[in-house]
Amino acid sequence: MELNKRQETILQIVKDNGPITGEQIADRLNLTRATLRPDLAILTMAGYLDARPRVGYFYTGKTGTQLLTENLKKIYVKDYQSIPVVVNENVSVYDAIVTMFLEDVGTLFVVDANSYLVGVLSRKDLLRASIGKQELSTLPVNIIMTRMPNITTCEKDDPLIGVAKDLIHKQIDSVPVVRKTDNGDLEVTGRITKTNVTKAFVALADEY
Ligand code: ADP
């Protein structure tokens, strides 16, 4: 995060004199407490300063990289997930291809009659089936999909960085966000793709 000149000055004053009250910092800068409030809020929110009631502000001693890492770990799946596109396991490969085009996604999640996750279909899974000799309009997707228990999933409260690592290490484009039922079945509630991770990355860069 880029600090402006006044924020740098405030940081230095707190480093040298902390704990110090907002009033005392304002006096040193010949400014009013109200003028300083936004800068103090930014420095506190970004983690450079901490504030204790009746004591004042003090310097946390954390570097920009430490703060960036801490903030990265505070980005969760639920903050960036998209709506999942699901198909029933009995639909044909042909219909799955049409759904993929109409919904403009690169991965479909496959569910059973109870709407529980049973598989994943990627673009290449569908292409591979298409170059075979099978009749696509009668071939059900459950014959060609990647199936449970080999599906990598995540939950809405997981840190996004862990999902990003899964996308890289497992060489996949998308991970379903699931909710586990009491019976251990998985309901699909969202999806995280490389695009969602890229959006989080850009938002973090804008913040800093
Ligand atoms: P593509 O095959 O179009 O390059 P992916 O890289 O996402 O797309 O998929 C590679 C393979 O991994 C496919 O066979 C797909 O079924 C499977 N796959 C995709 N997502 C997952 C996942 N979340 N868990 C397990 N396997 C997956």
Image (spheres, grey):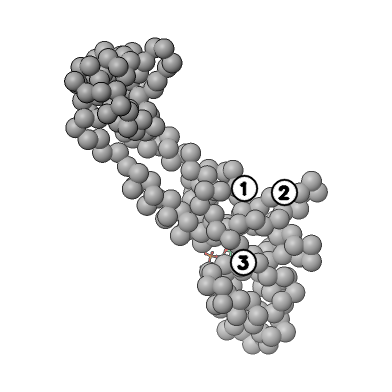
**Is the residue marked by circle 3 packed among few (<14), some (14-19), or many (20+) residues within 10 Å?**
many
Query: Which image quarter has ligand 1?
Result: bottom right
Question: Residue at 42% of width from left, 55% of height from top?
Answer: 199
Residue 44 shows up from this direction:
yes
Looking at marks 1 and 2 on the same chain, the residue that comes earlier in the sequence is marked by 1
**Mark 2 touching mark 3, by CB under 8 A?**
no
Screen quadrant of the C terminus: top left
Amino acid type at image mark 2: Lys
Instruction: Tell me the tag on residue 180.
Output: 2
Q: Which residue is mark 1?
A: 155
Q: Quadrant of residue 95?
A: bottom right
User: Which percent across, then down, holds residue 146?
Assistant: 65, 65
Q: Is mark 1 within 8 Å of ligand 1?
A: no
Q: Position of residue 115 (x, y in %)?
A: 75, 62
Q: Which mark is residue 85?
A: 3
Instruction: Tell me whether circle 1 and circle 2 mark residues in contact (CB < 8 Å).
Output: yes
Vertical side of 68 occupied by 90: above or below: below
Q: CA distance from mark 1 to mark 3?
A: 17 Å
Type of the residue with mark 3:
Val
